[in-house]
Image: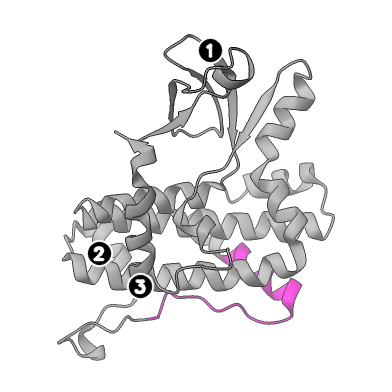
Amino acid sequence: MKIKMPCLKCFTLDGIEEPALSYLELGESNIHEVICTRGHKTLVALTQHKHEVLFEIGAMALADGYPREAIATIAAALERFYELCIRVVSAGQEIPNDQLQAAWRLIDAASERQFGAFVLTMLLWSKESPIVIDNKKPNLPNTSKANTKTWKEFRNAVIHKGLIPPEHEAIEYCELVYTHINELTKKLTSQFEHEWLSQAQKQATEVRQANPEKEIVLFGLPTTLFLARGRQAPDSFRNALTQLNGYRQIYSR
């Protein structure tokens, strides 16, 4: 998926009132070199966390009618959110980054170990066992709770067993994840706002330190989870999907 953005150098260098568009393809790195149709090159750093980007891709998939792909991607977004929680709390507790990286390498290839690390990190920080959604069930119309899968059962059935869920079920499970991430985000940022923002800009900071001669433009996307942190945040995933249709023109396949 690509992002359409106006070329900033059309304004600053050439003074062109109607700048050409640049197309930035979302990838593993947050740092991108984009070239507009007039040839201007700009080094752009997205200020989104990885889980925000993944969640946005999942929401777009659901809006486009691909519920199975949406669930698989949003499940990945939740895992990366748990990793971010660990990194934010560790930064707030002044854990040296090299020590955190050494510990993370021990669990990097095991999602269950990462989940365990998240649970204990949140416990040690807040002195409370964190709320998780693995055993939570949504309210599905015309389906009893006894016949409704938990989030973990549903996610595993989609990813590992090829389950193709109907759209209305996918939306209800996404609602669980959306609410869960937003509640934990508010709790974390109430104490670690600086660390949260620093993690979002980490790649840009590292590139600037390694290449001080390079000019990097920070660019923030109005993603679903980013907007959820604002004062007029959508109070549900359904409303967030409706809001997505208002700005989805910035995305291009």
Furthest-front residue in this view: 17
- Label 2, on which residue? 157
Amino acid type assigned to the residue bearing label 3 in the image: Trp
Q: Residue 151: which numbered mark, if any?
A: 3
Amino acid type assigned to the residue bearing label 2 in the image: Ala
Residue 196, picture quadrant: bottom right
Is there any visible trace of residue 109 in the rendered image? no
Nearest to N terminus: mark 3 or mark 2? 3
Decide if residue 239 is on the left or right side of residue 206.
left
Residue 2, picture quadrant: top left
Q: Residue at x 63, y 44 (%)?
A: 105
Indicate which label's residue lies in the foreground, 1 or 3.
1
Q: Secondary structure at mark 2?
A: helix
Point out residue 140 in the picture as x, y percentages from the top left corner: 23, 82
| Count of all numbered marks drawn on residues in the image | 3
- Label 1, on which residue? 40
Q: Secondary structure at mark 1?
A: loop
- The answer to which of 140 and 129 lies nearer the viewer is 140
Quarter of the image that includes the N terminus? top left
Point out residue 232 in the picture as x, y percentages from the top left corner: 52, 68
State how far apart marks 1 and 3 are (Cα).
Answer: 46 Å
Query: Badge 2: how crowded within 10 Å, few (<14), some, or many (20+)?
Result: some
Is residue 74 inside the magenta stretch? no
State how far apart marks 2 and 1 are (Cα).
Answer: 47 Å
Q: Residue at x 19, y 65 (%)?
A: 167
Point out residue 62 in the picture as x, y percentages from the top left corner: 26, 56
Is residue 133 inside the magenta stretch? yes
Nearest to N terminus: mark 2 or mark 1? 1
Q: Which residues are magenta?
A: 116-136
Contact, CB < 8 Å: mark 3 with mark 2?
A: no
